[in-house]
Amino acid sequence: MASRAPVSRALAGDEAAPAAALTFERGAPGRRAVDVPAWRGEASELPPAHLLRASLPLPELSQGELVRYYSDLASRNFGIDTGSYPLGSCTMKYNPKVDDLLASLTGFADLHPLAPEALAQGTLAVLFELQEALGAITGLPAVSLAPAAGAQGELAGILMVKRALEERGELARRRRVLVLDSAHGTNPATAAMAGFAVTELQSGPDGRIDEPALRAVLDDTVAAVMVTLPSTLGLWEPAIEAVARDIHAVGAYLYADGANLNAIVGRLRFGDVGFDVAHLNLHKTFSTPHGGGGPGAGPVLASSALARFLPTPVVARREADGEATYALVAPEASIGRMQQFHGSVGVLLRAYAYLRTLGLEGLRAVSENAVLNANYLRELLLPYYDLPFPTRVLHEVVFSATRQRREHGIRAYDIAKRLIDHGVHPPTVYFPLIVEEALMIEPTETESRESLERVAAAFIAIAEEAARDPEALHAAPTTAPIGRLDEALAARQPDLRWRPPAEA
Ligand SMILES: *Cc1c(COP(=O)(O)O)cnc(C)c1O
């Protein structure tokens, strides 16, 4: 059991080292990072209870101390700009800096979300064009950019299905949403939050949709079936068109979890293979540095039959006297708002810049290289790790550490921790849930051949170390500022408050 040291302390590192001290533990009374002119106006009329307490313990640092503190923390951060980040399902790829540059132009970045539409025409025009582009890429022409994450896009999509069923007078009967057992946890959570009962579908022995098993549970009590394409195992679903026909034959909707779009972008459109509604993760497929909880954008896309139910707002284009104007509008039978404004506009702008710089040819190169890279890593690691579903993959590959566990008592967790010492971000572990000791590796399209080989060399060195010196692996990581945290405790009971030493 790891120690119960407060997370704030643990993240700041070894307290014995002055470099790791918190802001509160640095500096000296009276020191300031900026000089603020003294207040020479009227005495405040605020009641005393609303004034800042003189006794409030705030850090007192010089500007130099403050800058060193944050620079030190920043240098400990691992990001895609510092190394390989094969975190399966998260698509942690390099993001072109020009996308940040465009999103930070003052005309975009300083626009107030409540600015009158007449003053926001440029931003609205870009958002409209992005809607059109995403509709064209997915073959689902009705688009709302409002959802702020993949999970929110999913919820919007399933609420749209619910509203459509309500209009058809079938909501009372259609109470079930079918979800694959390999799905991201957000799929069953979405269905449950929307008020449906979740029926879990077991994948077939090849990790793909088991068609007979699906047909056995498909009937007129089903509202929708949620399918991730390609799946979280990185696998294509060869039966998807037949599956779509079966689902439509019983009057249900087919939902696409499009978070893995980088595997198929520019090559396959959800609308063309029978999907009715989908979400995308722009922060995965279309640029935006993400991780650690944000930021994101999860547009929801649908066939024209479901357009009336889109969340509000959508951007509409009107033409009068040869001149276009753009407006935020509420679809006729909208499910309502997903969040207060128009979505994560900064993320949307990055996605637009990314699309415009790549074009269709570039997008096809994205999916080609994402698939090539995942299969190259698959080949390099095949002799060293078990591969539960031994077919070619698309954008990611899920290995298993069962061999290492059986022979040397080494688990996926130990391997993940040792990768940190090799300068490689750990893969996603223990997901998808149907793979024991899962090591879910997604190299993404932006890694070079040399970088893929370095990642493979790290995994291989660890496989060899497992046989030679398993104890050393249990102790990893040894080069990180902190070793192993009690992660469950840190997540459930984060102690982020500093207290003066006397109170601690
Ligand atoms: C990332 C992901 C999600 C959830 O997206 P968020 O933006 O994290 O809410 C859903 N499904 C799949 C397959 C994903 O990879």
Image: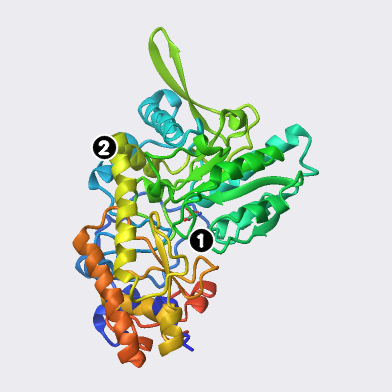
Callout 2: SS: helix
Q: Is residue 348 above or below residue 417?
A: above
Would you say residue 150 is visible in this rendering? Answer: yes
Q: Is residue 460 above or below residue 113?
A: below
**Percent position (x, y) of residue 393?**
40, 57
Q: Left or right: 257 with respect to 442?
A: right
Q: Are marks 2 and 1 in contact (CB under 8 Å)?
A: no
The residue positioned 66% from the left and 45% from the top of the image is 224
Name which quarter of the figure residue 199 lies in: bottom right
- Tell me which numbered mark, 2 or 1, is placed earlier along the sequence: 1
Determine the CA span between mark 2 and mark 1.
Answer: 56 Å
**Percent position (x, y) of residue 337?**
58, 39
Name which quarter of the figure residue 400 lies in: bottom left
Which residue sits furthest top? 321
Dot 2 corresponds to which residue? 357
Dot 1 corresponds to which residue? 48
Foreground pick, 112 / 136: 136
> Which amino acid lies under the numbered mark 2 shown in the image of this protein?
Thr
Question: For disc 2, does the CB lie below 8 Å from ligand 1?
Answer: no
Foreground pick, 408 / 241: 241
Q: Left or right: 287 with respect to 413?
A: left
The residue positioned 49% from the left and 39% from the top of the image is 270
Few, some or many residues within 10 Å of mark 1 (<14, 14–19, 20+): few
Callout 1: SS: helix
Q: Left or right: 165 with respect to 501?
A: right
Q: Left or right: 277 with respect to 72?
A: right
**Percent position (x, y) of residue 419?**
31, 75
